[in-house]
Image: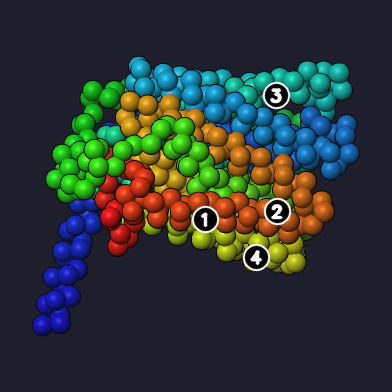
Amino acid sequence: INAEFFFFFFFFFFDKFSGYCKSAWNMLYSVGPMVLANTLEWYEFATYIYVAKEIEENFFSAYSSSISAIATWAAFATTFALRPIGGFFFGLLSDRVGRSRAVFYTVFGMVFSTTAQGMLPTAYCCGERTGMIGVVLLIILRMIQGLCTGGEIGSIVVFLSEYSPAPVVGICVSSVQYTASIGMMAAVAFTWVLTNLLSHDQLLLWGWRVPFLFACVPGTILMLLPWAKENEGRQRLSQKNCDDMLPFLMTNEIKPQKTGVMILLAIVCSMGGSMYAFSANYLVTFVQVHGTTDTSSALLAGVFQNLFLIVGGVVSGLICDFYGVGTQMIASLVWCLITAVPGYWILSSYPESLALMYFVVSFVFGMGYGLLWGGAAYFMTELFPKSTRATSVGVTYNLIASIGGLTPMVSETLSLANPILPGIYVAAGSLVSLAALVVTLSLWSRKKLRLTNIRHLPYLMGCKPG
């Protein structure tokens, strides 16, 4: 009897899960160019992070080592100043002319600005006066990247949330995270190969330019591919199923809040995760500056970090679909809260241990990054009605990213006083977000706040409104 029960359970589970995987794959395959666009855009965006040391020596070598490091990350942070504006502009475009068309325009802008960064004059190769022109152009191009990156994310996330079948909407929306991770992993892997093939002088003179220039090849191919249109997709039906399943969540029962209120709510609930995510990226530089890790080992840790980031993103999507995005958000913020300070303490206390460095940078922060951002995008899309969803998500996501984008610069400044302070800074942000999320879910459970507009259950494991 036990054997028969085991085989029945195994085949029942396998049949259901294989159907789940097939449905998710069919959806993602049908919007292939859009998903690939996300991968490419994050490759382009992350390239700066992994050649930050070379950029520092090329553009900011005239300053002291501490000032030049801060200036390098300040130039990176300028990208985030324009992200909310890009989210608003391309969000409006997405709401009016279509999600896929808006994404296409952002890809063009990203390819242009990334390729142009690889062509800039620098103080290292062309002298101080010409180098100043290069600094100004670098900041302008980073701002263009910020506009395009900000516009891309809202349109893709909203498209996937609206057109994915209800049972797999979590894993499909979280694909934004793990495909972004593939792009970032490609960037760090490319940089790692160059670091091992070229001498230090070659890297400084021209090697750092190669990852930027390479972006024009896949970018051009991607823009020539046929792009899916909304009216070609299978409109999510799910609303009929959701209404049958969830009579308690009719519009007249829980009224939606004002858009501004929901944007503020999303920012507070997610900003700690954003700080943790950018702290994870920053660690690749941190272990070189504040430890004894060589560049090659640090970049390899970045490759493994992105592998675990992909795993975390997939796990996050599964949790969203089987236990609810509320459950996923709580679990991921708890992970961020309890690992930030110990992670920085281990790296600063045992700088010579490569094993501990790989464990913290790759597994601990990689999994935390993937777990949180795999579901955070879906958490945001649920908050807003369809008519303003792309604009609202674009603005919200990018305001949160702007807060997180300051983390490397703030962490570099704090680490000059004490290398553990960046961990305390990130943990404090995670604690604020977790407290805000608990209060928000409490209001939802008492039917005081509406948090869903796409798929209403599951949301929080073992809990329904009322």
222 vs 306: above or below: above
> How much space separates mark 1 and mark 3, taking CA atoms?
39 Å
> How much space separates mark 4 and mark 2, taking CA atoms?
11 Å
Residue highlighted by disc 1: 435
> How much space separates mark 1 and mark 4, taking CA atoms?
21 Å
Q: Earlier in the sequence, mark 4 or mark 2?
A: 4
Residue 12, given in percent of the width and then of the height, sits at 16, 64
Disc 3 on helix, strand or loop?
helix
Residue 205, given in percent of the width and then of the height, sits at 77, 31
Give the residue displayed 41% in from the left and 18% down from the top.
Answer: 93
Compare residues 233 and 330 and report the one nearer the observer: 330
Image quadrant occupied by the N terminus: bottom left
- The 10 Å Cα crowd at callout 1, few under 14, some 14 to 19, many 20 or more, is some
Give the residue displayed 22% in from the left and 54% down from the top.
Answer: 18
Is residue 160 shown to the viewer in this render?
A: no
Disc 1 on helix, strand or loop?
helix
Residue highlighted by disc 3: 138
Q: Which of marks 3 and 4 is nearer the N terminus?
A: 3
Q: Which of marks 3 and 2 is nearer the N terminus?
A: 3
Which mark lies nearer to you, 3 or 4? 4
Residue highlighted by disc 2: 422
Residue type at tag 2: Pro
The reply, left or right, for residue 319 in relation to residue 424 is: left
> How much space separates mark 3 and mark 2, taking CA atoms?
27 Å
Disc 2 on helix, strand or loop?
helix
- The 10 Å Cα crowd at callout 3, few under 14, some 14 to 19, many 20 or more, is many
Which mark lies nearer to you, 1 or 4? 1
Disc 4 on helix, strand or loop?
helix
Q: Which of marks 1 and 3 is nearer the N terminus?
A: 3
Residue highlighted by disc 4: 342
The reply, left or right, for residue 378 in relation to residue 277 is: left
Residue type at tag 1: Ala
